Amino acid sequence: MSQTPSNMLPLGTIAPNFNLADTTTNKNLTLEDVKGKKATLVMFICNHCPFVLHINSELVKLANTYKNSGVGFVAISSNDVVNYPQDSPKLMKEQAAKLGYPFPYLYDETQEIAKAYDATCTPDFFLFDSELKLVYRGELDDSRPSLNKPVTGNDIRKAISAILENKEVDPNQIPSVGCNIKWK
């Protein structure tokens, strides 16, 4: 299992817009459609990565905890589905239904959005404030599939809580680690 760290896009970066197909509804969604009033978490994930499989239940809990607090959530898969058919839009829809994703699961067929966000791995997280300025990019928490640590979502939960409490998000952030995005 190869480990790729996230690139750590500069804090303050404005969230790149997108217009992508939501595999759960078959409708296209933009950043404006999914953004939250107070914050927006953009997550690059996929169906097959063991790092994502390890944290999927926490992603569901996280979204269910904060979605009614003005935080928008969206997941994007940018993997090459020719070489990784388990990440196809049809199977993305099935995965979202099976796991009860309370957020849209978008397909980035051209991989342009992953490149715009400088996403490199799954999972890769980008938290933006109400003005869509990047305030957090990094790990969900310090658990990994090979470690014997519980999945808590602590790092992202602290960042979201800081935003909701009108406090500064700690700029000392640890990169996420996961499988590399499967580029075409």
Image (spheres, rainbow, N blue to C red):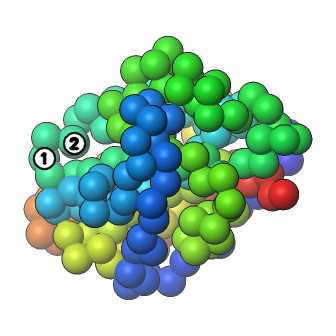
Q: Which mark is residue 8?
A: none
Residue 115 to residue 39: above or below: below
- Left/right placement of residue 170 relative to residue 52 reads left
Disc 2 secondary structure class: helix
Asked which secondary structure carries label 1, the reply is: helix
**Residue placed at 74% from the left, 54% from the top?**
181
Expressed as whole percent of the image width and height from the top left, the position of residue 100 reads 40, 21
**Residue 159 horizontal side relative to residue 80, left or right:** left
CB contact under 8 Å: marks 1 and 2:
yes
Location of the N terminus (image quadrant): top right
Above or below: residue 137 compared with residue 103: below
Using the image as rendered, state which of residue 27 and residue 24 is in the foreground: 27
Residue type at mark 2: give it. Answer: Tyr
Neighbour tally class for label 1: few under 14, some 14-19, many 20 plus, Cα within 10 Å: some
The residue identified by callout 2 is 66
Identify the residue at horizontal 38%, vertical 52% (top origin): 29
Residue name at image x 22 percent, y 42 percent: 66
Left or right side of 55 for 70: left
Query: What is the quadrant of the C terminus in the image?
Result: bottom right
Q: Where is 67 relative to 126, above or below?
A: above
Q: Which residue is at the front of the view, 38 or 155?
A: 38
Query: x%, y% of residue 98?
Result: 49, 15
Residue type marked 1: Ser
Instruction: From the top left corner, tell me how far across and down residue 74 is, in percent.
Output: 40, 48
| Residue at image mark 1 | 69
Q: Residue at x 21, y 41 (%)?
A: 67
